[in-house]
Image: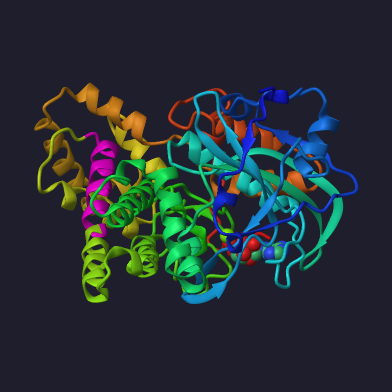
Amino acid sequence: MNHPHGLRLENSYTDLPEQFFTRINPTPVSEPKLLLFNTNLAKSLGIDLPTNDKEMLAQLFSGNTLPEDVSPIAQAYAGHQFGHFSILGDGRAHLIGEQITPDDKRFDIQLKGSGPTPYSRNGDGRAALAPMLREYLISEAMHALKIPTTRSLALVSTGEPVIRSSLLDGAILTRVASSHLRVGTFEYANATQGLEGLKQLADYAISRHYPEFIHQENPYLGFLKGVIERQAKLVAAWMHVGFIHGVMNTDNMTISGETIDYGPCAFMDIFSMGAVFSSIDSHGRYKYGSQVPAAQWNLARLADSLIPLLHKETAKAVKLAEVAIEGYSKEFNHAWISGMRSKLGLFGEEAEDFSLAQGLLDWMQNSKVDYTRTFRDLIQENVPENEAYNSPEFQNWHILWKSRLTRNSRPLKDSFCLMRDSNPVIIPNNNYVEEALAAGEGGDLKPFLALLEALKNPFEETVSNEVYRNQTTLPNPNYQTFCGT
Ligand code: AMP
Ligand code: MG
């Protein structure tokens, strides 16, 4: 079959019962303009669009024109938002189709900010430019940091204002995800679709993301454990780079184990277990140090939703779910310590590695030092001279760490190599992100593009990340991110 521009779009999701989605087209916009196009991502998806035809790309990635034979949908889902259950759904997103890549992988191509749907409730179906720039930048940075995430393929401005606390420029982001199945999709199925609908959804999710469990004796239990394992690894990876998601509601947690929905997210500068930047998270439900239990709570909502499938006797199903959820801590601890060993250049395993890693974090918390920079400083022969490093607390820790390094099975240079590969020189620091977004909102994308480029090789000292590495601007202690709509 002929696929113009390599667009091989299918839609397997619409094989589910019709209550799982609504067929609806994006609402056209008056003056779409292409701001960003991710050529490398397009290539890896097998998409070959004429990048010099900006008008054509703007029409396509605004939803004004649709590829041939596609029938866009908005997906239904539910979710616990800050602990409260609601029926939700894509209120401002359209799934254009599932792109089949040259190596036969399947990725959702979704427009976000593309107009209202029956799930919009009181929303306008639109998105403002700065939050979509933020999602583009941070999702691509996360990918470069080797953390599973949705990706960003394109960004267009709409030429239409959106009404928030003031009038802002509208924009549409094209998001690529290995699927948009969420914990909230299962909550929706369990709450509204009966056993049969729930089973169809679970079978679909298993065949799409966990085919290894299809022939297991209890595929649904295997599936639950699989999601728990991937999410435990994901949250450990966030903790390792100091990422704070900001709005870990169950509708923002994927079944695939990818990070999704970059709203009020931010990276920590000064280390604090209590770091929270989101303006809507006044109680710190999703602060840095609470992400680990928050993910477990969300996974327990997935387990609740799967109870009818786990065993025909409810009491036995509940027991299976409980044991699986308890297993999260073990998965998380394993992923966390193995990542911390890499960050500290440790080979082999010693029981004291936990307290060694924790000791460094405790010192960081008390000394209010920059999280990312501290790990890079450790790679140097001698850590820099300053008050924090000269303190007896740090010096004592440093002696313990050095002595642990001597017990490594490998030479010191291997440790430093491992540390260089595990500790970024650059993360999307709040100061640079804000500057780039503010300029972008004002029509100047240069700072954004420079930062995007610098974040492409976060583990290497490159020419493009040099200015950011050497920055001396101080973190803003009152920094806040807004929900980003
Ligand atoms: P979020 O907090 O971005 O994960 O969104 C939570 C829910 O609100 C989802 O169902 C979104 O589709 C919906 N939503 C967010 N912003 C809008 C908007 N501007 N118009 C319609 N629905 C929205
Ligand atoms: Mg969401």
Which residue is more in the foreground, 200 or 28? 200
Q: Is residue 180 magenta?
A: no
For the point 75% across and 40% down, the residue is 61
Which residue is more in the foreground, 476 or 78? 78
Q: Is residue 121 left or right of residue 166?
A: left
For the point 78% across and 44% down, the residue is 62
Tell me the quarter of the picture where residue 164 sits.
bottom right
Tell me the quarter of the picture where residue 140 sits.
top right
Q: Is residue 378 left or right of residue 403?
A: right
Q: Measuring from the top left, give residue 417's x and y in whole percent.
A: 30, 25
Q: Measuring from the top left, give residue 97's x and y in whole percent.
A: 64, 42
Name the image quarter holding the N terminus: top right
For the point 56% across and 59% down, the residue is 17
Q: Is residue 338 magenta?
A: yes
Name the image quarter holding the C terminus: bottom right
Q: Which residues are drawn in magenta?
A: 328-345
The relative height of residue 443 versus residue 332 in the rendered view (above or below) is above
In which quadrant of this rendering is ligand 1 seen?
Answer: bottom right
On the question of residue 480 being in view, the answer is no
Which residue is more in the foreground, 339 or 255? 255
Scheme of image coloration: rainbow
Mark count = 0
On the question of residue 448 being in view, the answer is yes
